[in-house]
Image: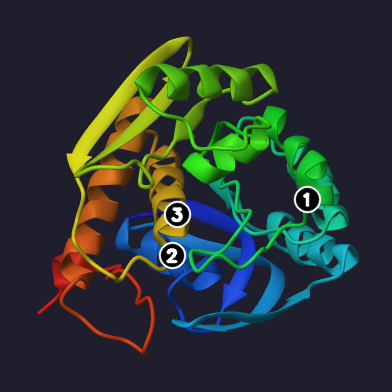
Amino acid sequence: MNEPRDYTTVLTIAGSDGSGGAGIQADLKTIAAHGCYGLSVITAVTAQSTMGVADVHPIPPAFIARQFGTIVSDIRVDAVKIGMLGPAENAEMVAELIAGLNGVPIVLDTVLRSSSGAALFSSASTAAMKRLFPLATLITPNLPEAALLTGRSSLPAGKTEIERIALELHQQGARSVLVKGGHWEGEMCHDCLLHEGRFFWFSNPKIATRNTHGTGCTLSSAIASELARKQEMPEAVSKGISYTRRALQVGANRKLGHGTGPLNHFPDRAD
């Protein structure tokens, strides 16, 4: 009889989305789609649907620590994805917790607002989030988040300015930076990765769909899953983007609720 093999695990630290399109729920679906085993620490419970976020109930920092400690005392963690954190004290607690995960790749999705525009992270908490930058292997801001985190009042225009923003975020402590270009005007989406002093650009045609709820959660979880599977950073990002595009394409012809619907997190199993 063969010895049982260990699961490849990804721990997501994020908020819960009862509609299943974003947050912990989207993360766990994405992790499963990559053949990994999903673990979770919930930082907040939200009341939300495809119409937007109605309310947010943060989990106390002590219970975040209790969830985390109980898991890592028993189960090896191969990668971590961090999403919505809530108030500053939650970000500070998560920073304290992940500081002990030596050698584990950590992907920080710098969630400041939901895809519907609802604030999920107060401006007073931005400094607390930045404490996580040096601990993360990769941060994944979209263009509005990148602008906010670097003190800009408008979105960056053109590749040169985006590269400049990525460098600024690196100087703030982030080891690698993926600036997501979904808000870029025009028919193309240009994503910029700064890794080990080099810029990598990933350019793809935009996908015509209203079902974009949870796109950032999905991409960051896909990249974390690829890193857990020992992919190098540029390849992990490339594969994460390709998976997210397939999930958008297959989800485009589905309907859920009356607002912004979700991606299809299992695009290869869709009928």
Q: Is residue 78 visible?
A: no
Residue position marked by numbered label 3 in the rendering: 216
Q: Quadrant of residue 74?
A: bottom right
Q: Quick one: label 2, few (<14), some, or many (20+) residues within 10 Å? A: many
Q: Secondary structure at mark 1?
A: helix
Q: What is the number of the mark on residue 123?
A: 1
Mark 3 Cα within 10 Å, few/some/many (few <14, many 20+)?
A: many
Taking the view exactly as shown, the residue that stands out farthest to the top is: 197
Q: Quadrant of the C terminus?
A: bottom left
- Using the image, determine if residue 90 lies above or below residue 211: above
Residue type beneath disc 3: Gly
Q: Nearer the viewer, residue 1 or 35?
A: 35
**Residue 262 pos. (x, y %):** 35, 73
Question: Most extreme residue toward the bottom, as rendered?
Answer: 257
State how far apart marks 1 and 3 are (Cα).
20 Å
Q: Where on the picture, by quarter, is residue 7?
A: bottom left
Real-space Cα separation, disc 1 to disc 2, in angstroms: 22 Å
Where residue 181 appears, x then y in whole percent? 37, 40
